[in-house]
């Protein structure tokens, strides 16, 4: 899976998909996808990522409290 870094527009290969989708985690492991040699994995902040199409990541991946309003009803 790939996401795009909104700061520089480069694609990031997601290595730890579970961390990307876990709303408790603020970072995930990935690596930039450029050149012939694969760079070392590094930590990326999920808030800086979007999908390659330009859409934001789902709120349920970023905010653990995304359904709190529904529970209060």
Image (cartoon, grey):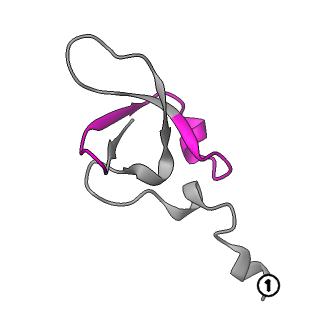
Image quarter where the C terminus lies is bottom right
Give coordinates of residue 24: x percent, y percent: 68, 50
Q: Secondary structure at mark 1?
A: loop
Q: Residue furthest right?
A: 72
Residue at (56, 41) in percent of width and height: 27
Q: Which residues are magenta?
A: 7-28
Q: Is residue 49 above or below residue 63?
A: above
Residue 32 sits inside the magenta stretch: no
Residue at (27, 57) in percent of width and height: 54
Residue at (33, 45) in percent of width and height: 5
Give the number of marks: 1
Residue 12 sits inside the magenta stretch: yes
Quadrant of the rendered image containing residue 32: top left
Q: Crowdedness of circle 1 by 10 Å Cα count: few (<14), some, many (20+)?
A: few
Give coordinates of residue 63: x percent, y percent: 61, 62
Residue at (40, 49) in percent of width and height: 49
Quadrant of the rendered image containing residue 25: top right
Q: Is residue 15 above or below residue 47?
A: above
Give coordinates of residue 35: x percent, y percent: 20, 18
Q: Residue furthest top?
A: 37
11 left or right of 60 in image: left
Which residue matches tag 1? 72
């Amino acid at each position: 899976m790939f996401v795009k870094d909104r700061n520089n527009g480069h694609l990031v290969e997601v290595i730890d998909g579970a961390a990307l989708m876990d709303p408790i985690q603020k970072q995930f492991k990935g690596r930039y996808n450029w050149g012939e040699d694969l760079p070392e994995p590094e930590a990326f902040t999920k808030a800086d990522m979007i999908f390659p199409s330009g859409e934001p990541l789902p709120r349920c991946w970023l905010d653990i409290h995304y359904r709190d309003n529904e529970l209060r009803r």
